[in-house]
Amino acid sequence: MRLFMNRLFLAFSTVAAAIGLFFLGWILYTLCAKGLAGLSLHVFTHDLIEGGLRNVIIGQLIMSGVATLIGIPVGILAGIYLQEYGGNSKLTEFIRDLSDVMMSAPSIVVGTFVYAIVVMPTGHTSGWAGILALFILMVPIIVRTTDDMLKLVPVELREAGIAIGASKYHVTMNIVIRYAKAGILTGILLAFARVVGETAPLLYTSGSSEFWSTDLTGTFPSLTVSIYNLATMPDEEMVQLGWTGAFLLTTMVLIINLLGRYASNKTRR
Amino acid sequence: MEILFKKLTQLSASLLFVILAATTAVLYLSAKPAIEEFGAGFLFESRWGVEEQVTMDGDMPIGVTESGVELSDDDFIDDDDDDFISDDDSEAGSGSREIYGALVPIVGTIFSTLIAMLFSIPIAMGIAVFLSEIAASSIAKPVGVAIELLASIPSIIYGMWGLFYFGPFIANIFGGNTVSLLVAGLVLAIMVIPFMAALSRDAISTVPDMLKESAYAMGATKLEVIKDVVFPYAKSGIIGSIILSFGRALGETMAVAFVIGGVYQFASKVTDPTNSIPVVLANSFSESSGMSLSVLFYLALILFILSFIVIGAAKFYFLRRK
């Protein structure tokens, strides 16, 4: 009886795993089959208005990129504060809890917030509004990874730095950060991968445009928002373009993730 | 330099607090007109964008025109909603008043999340146990990496797949619509499975081998080891992973927006379309103004508070582990 139950349970877990993997495999299969079907050079060389995706891909990268560029210093500095200056005070714990809360806050709520403070006063959607929304989403991720990575730096290293008379600033920047560099880089890449695929906070902050634009003060082309719009259109061709966009987006996100993984594997050696 | 640097780090850290406080404050202030208008009854009112005649005596409904109910396409809030709002209070005598209630999207959100949990928990646990206890490491390692990568796929992909493939698939089996509460719940389930499985596997892998080996040495079967040693030890981590996944499903917009239907009515069967809070927000925001916009902020505030509670619960469990 015991052995039978055991078999039953093992079979159940294996079947559950198989079911889960089957659906996930199905998604990837559809994505590749549909996405590759529409993939051509045309997609990369033309804007959305001409049936390509060039402007929206670049637009998405610009917005996520700028959000990351602003997010990196803020996130790392806040992480440094938590680990190096904050000590074990209640305030530090409180800020840690806050960043956890922000990390799991629904991204659509961030969108509504940015809509209220940027889009409503200015009266129109803009690239900057999208950047702000993505920035708010990614900062807590960078803060928490920096915090965790700095925690791994041996105290002896800091003490050695202080002992030879280096200031805390020098110890932090030249010893602690250098030691944790690869881990932080992984965190940044993962944060970037996360925001690059975000749709909900961009829907009404950046909107999306069919035309080429590098003007961040106006409505800005976004890949994810365009995929959403294209997929809900009745036109077959548009839906096909949506799938191609979805395929490219997923490929992008997975590659960035693999890069992040590679960076963190290198540190462990 | 030293002091400047310290100040900078402090500033960055406090920025987190500022953003969170500002979000709460802005949402509350923007929702204030709606909160004052509808109060807590908003939570239990099932009509949305319905115009109600207001007579001299008070709130006697004479004719109720269902303006926002039967829309099934993308634009749920009529543009002409705005016209009604302007004469809301100016003609307190016999004007018409728009009734908004959050009950439909709240119920839709909670039920789609519960359906998602119902299906994802056993499957994710199965995967976690399979990866950590059953499979040989030559299989467990690549599958584990694949699961982690799948957890990073943008949610819009799940939504699109749900709309074009999974929805029709479910409709073939159970009948009903290709967009429905059931499809939304199942797409959410599939979306959170990799996330939940990866977190649970991490929790299970913290169980010391020594404990498991002792149990095996006593003659326990794998089931007994997992049930009596592994799960109790990793319990808080596993529960934490479930709560985090719950929070993720609760606030998910894109995966649901494609497949829930977005109509303001209760689903009498699970195969009926309904609505959820994030989807209402995603679909109606850009076309709203005045009171209808304020109502959306009210909804956003409710969602924010809901997710706040969920994360609080997750933190509580994680903290107890330490």
Image (cartoon, coloured by chain):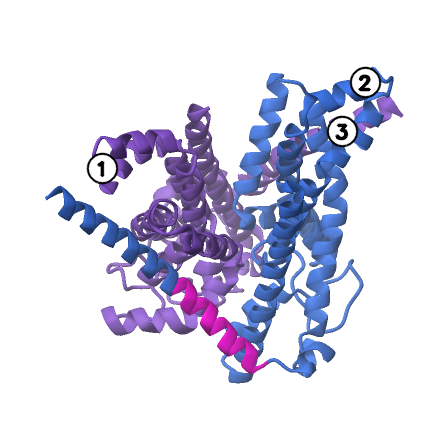
Give the residue displayed 38% in from the left and 33% down from the top.
B209
Where residue A87 appears, as percent x and y from the top left, is 66, 18
Residue depicted at x 32% and y 72%: B169
Q: Are marks 1 and 2 in contact (CB under 8 Å)?
A: no
Q: Nearer the viewer, mark 1 or mark 3?
A: 1
- Mark 1 residue element: helix
Any part of residue B22 in sight: no
Q: Nearer the viewer, residue B210 or B231?
A: B210
Q: Nearer the viewer, mark 2 or mark 3?
A: 2
Q: Are marks 2 and 3 in contact (CB under 8 Å)?
A: no
Q: Which residue is more in the foreground, A235 or A166? A: A166
Identify residue for label 1: B224
- Highlighted range, magenta: A23-38
Amino acid beneath label 1: Glu
Disc with the residue nearer the chain's start (1 vs 3): 3
Rendering coords of residue B193 (x, y %): 40, 52
Mark 1 in CB contact with mark 3 (< 8 angstroms): no
Q: Which residue is mark 3?
A: B9
Determine which quarter of the picture holds residue B27.
Answer: top right
Q: From what the image shows, is residue B94 above or below residue B174?
A: above
Letter of the blue chain: A
Chain identifier of the residue bearing label 2 in the image: A
At mark 3, the secondary structure is helix
Chain B, colour shown = purple
Question: x%, y% of residue B205?
Answer: 42, 38
Q: Chain of mark 1?
A: B
Instruction: Report how many numbered discs are placed on residues in the image.
Output: 3
